Image: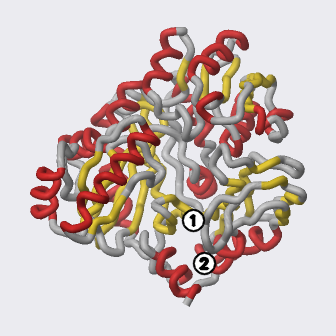
Amino acid sequence: MFQKVLIANRGAIARRVVKACEALGISSVAVYSTPDGGAPHLAEASETYPLPGQHASDTYLNQAALLAAVDETGADAVHPGYGFLAENADFADALEARGVCFVGPNSKWLRAMGDKVAARELAERHGFPVFVGSPRLEGLDQARQLADVIGYPIMIKPSAGGGGIGIRMVNGPADLEAAMGQARGLAERSFGDGGIFIERWIERARHIEFQLLGDGGGRALHVFERECSIQRRHQKVIEESPAPGIDRDEVLAMADQAAAFAARLGYDNVGTLETLRAGPADYGFLEMNTRIQVEHGVTEAVTGLDLVAVQLRLAAGEPLPPPPCLDGHALEARVYAEHPRTQLPATGRLSVFRPPDLYGVRVDTGYQVGQWVTPFYDPLLAKVIGHGTTREQAIGRVLVGLKAFEIQGVHTNIPLLIEVLQDGEFLSGRLDTGYLTRFLVKQSG
C-alpha cells in the first residue's frame, strides 16, 4: 500500500479522499488554491501544500505546479478526484515517469475513452450496444449528409470533455450550421479540441450508468447501476440506485454486459459506463468515465463499499473486492450555489453553513461556515444522500435533510430540489432526461 497520497483536487472529493486515506493508514497531502485556504479538509489532511493563485489553470490544472508538489512532499501516489486532471493521460504519464502511481486506470484507457467517437467505436467492436451516430465531423456538407441519414432531431456533441458542455440539439437542417459552430467553439475553448460528432436524439431517454471495477488482468465486476436522468444543461442534479421502474432482470443483464466489456478490454481500476435507455432493453453506449463519479456515494450507500478505498487498493495492486449485495435504496441531491429558478451560479460568503446530522442521511461537502464561494470553480456546495429500505424512505430522508440544511450567504437550489422530490411525476418514477425542463416550465406557468 502507498505511504503518502497527494490529492490533486478540492472540495467534497478532496475531503472524501482524505477520509479514505485515513481509514487505510495512508498519509495525505492536500494541495489548495488561495480561495480554498479555508476549506475544512485542510485541517483533516496529514499535510497541506499551497498552490498560489485563484484560477484552476494556475492551480488544480497546473501540471508543473502539481508535479513540483509531488516532488517536494515525497508522495508516492496521486489521487486526481473528478474533474480537473482526473482523466488527463499526459498527467498520468508524467507521474508514472517519476515512479509515482496515478490512482486511476492506465493512461491508455484515459486516451481511449477521452475521445467519445473512439470510445463509441471501441464499445461497438467489443459488442456493447450503441445508438446510431457519426464519425468525427470534417465539415458542413458531411454533417448534412449524415444528419439526413440519421434523421432529425439530432444532437451535436464535442468528442472531448464532458459535463454536458457544448451539446446542442438540432431540430432541422436550417439549424445545423449554427449549432455546429457553437458546439465546436465551446469544445475548443473548454477542452482544447474542437472535434464534434452527431448522435441520434432520443425522446424521453433515461440516463442509466453502471459502476465498474476492473483489475487489469481480464477480471471485472459491476456494482449495480445509478439512475441519473434528473439533469439541467445535461448535468446531473439527482441520482439514485437502483433505477426505479425498470425490470431488475433487464438492468442486471445490461450491468453484466458492461462488466464483460470492461473485462474484455483489460480495464483496470474504477470506471463508470454511461448509457441512454430508449425503452425496455434498448440501451446505447454514451461514454465511459475513467474516474470516480461525483455520485459515487449513492453506490456506496447501497453496497457498503468504500469506492475511494477500492480505487486506492486496486491502484496498489490488490485484488477486486467480493461482489456486494444490493441493500435498499439510496438517492442523492446535489446542492449548488445557484439561483433556484435561473440555475445560474451564485457567489458569496457562507455566513451560516450547518449540514444536517440525521439518521440515514449522509452529507459530502468541502465547505464550512465563513468560507467564500467564488466564481473560479464549480458551484457544487454539497451532496445530500439518503438511504433507506425503500425508495420512498430514501426520498423522505433526503427531503428531511434538505429542509434541515441551513445555508446563508448565497442562493442555493435547495427550494427547487425540495419541489422536485415532492412532485408526483418524480415520486411515481416517471423519469427521463427532459423531466427537469418540463418541471420548470410547469412551475413558471
From the viewer's perspective, is 1 left or right of 201? right
Dot 2 or dot 1: first in sequence order is 1
From the viewer's perspective, is 103 left or right of 149? right
Between 195 and 269, the residue placed more toward the observer is: 195
- Mark number displayed over residue 238: 1
Figure coloring: secondary structure
Between 337 and 206, the residue placed more toward the observer is: 337
Residue that numbered label 2 is attached to: 420
Q: Position of residue 431 (x, y in %)?
A: 45, 75
Residue under the image location 26 percent in, 45 percent down: 120
User: In the rendered structure, are the residues bearing label 2 and label 1 in contact, judged by CB atoms less than 8 Å apart?
Assistant: yes
Residue under the image location 66 percent in, 42 percent down: 13
Quadrant in which the N terminus appears: top right
Residue type, numbered disc 1: Ile
Q: Position of residue 413 (x, y in %)?
A: 68, 68
Give the CA distance from mark 2 to mark 1: 9 Å
Residue under the image location 29 percent in, 47 percent down: 196
- Mark number displayed over residue 80: none
Task: Count up the numbered dots.
Answer: 2
Q: Position of residue 149 (x, y in %)?
A: 10, 62
